[in-house]
Image (cartoon, helix red, strand yellow):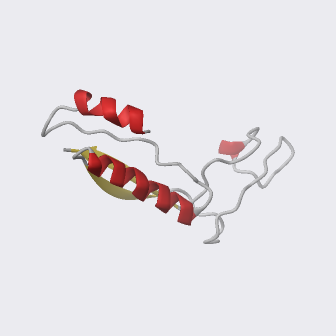
């Protein structure tokens, strides 16, 4: 993301400009998702930008706190309809942290 973030500085309007992105890196492992989020936050801080995080529900999986991959296929009745036909779920954490970046 670094090359894009370098360009972003010229695109954001000072004081009122806002930017967000899909924070889905390592979206099947909570610990790694948090690590990647902090790495990106530190990178943006280096450009003089502030990152605010808004926590959102992303759909709990049967109350299980451990993220699990759901292998989907046309015949898998347990698969979430959203993922039907997808070979591997790319985001299945219970919470999503929406980044809002600004000066």
98 or 64, which lies in front?
A: 98
38 or 66, which lies in front?
A: 38
Residue drawn 83% across and 49% down?
Answer: 76
Q: Is residue 67 above or below residue 43?
A: below
Residue drawn 66% across and 68% down?
Answer: 62
| Identity of the residue furthest to the left in this view | 15
Q: Is residue 88 above or below residue 14?
A: below
| Quadrant placement of the N terminus | top left
Give the side of residue 72 with respect to residue 31, left or right.
Answer: right
Residue 50 rendering spot, x and y as whole percentages: 24, 51
- The answer to which quarter of the image holds residue 75 is top right
Residue drawn 40% across and 33% down?
Answer: 3
Residue 12 rendering spot, x and y as whole percentages: 23, 32
| Identity of the residue furthest to the right in this view | 75
Residue 63 rendering spot, x and y as whole percentages: 62, 71
Give the side of residue 22 with respect to residue 60, left or right.
Answer: left
Q: Is residue 68 above or below residue 83?
A: below
Number of numbered tags placed on the structure image: 0
Residue 40 rendering spot, x and y as whole percentages: 40, 50
Give the side of residue 103 with respect to residue 72, left or right.
Answer: left
Give the side of residue 61 with respect to residue 86, left or right.
Answer: left
| Quadrant placement of the C terminus | top left
């Amino acid at each position: 993301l670094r090359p894009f973030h370098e360009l972003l500085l010229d695109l954001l309007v000072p004081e009122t400009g806002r930017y967000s992105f899909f924070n889905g890196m390592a979206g099947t492992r909570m610990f790694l998702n948090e690590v990647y989020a902090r790495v990106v936050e530190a990178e943006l801080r280096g450009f003089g930008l502030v990152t605010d995080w808004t926590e959102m529900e992303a759909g709990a999986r049967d109350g299980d706190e451990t993220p699990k991959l759901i292998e989907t296929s046309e015949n898998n009745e347990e698969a979430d309809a959203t993922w039907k036909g997808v070979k591997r779920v790319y985001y299945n954490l219970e919470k999503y942290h929406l980044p809002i970046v600004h000066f």
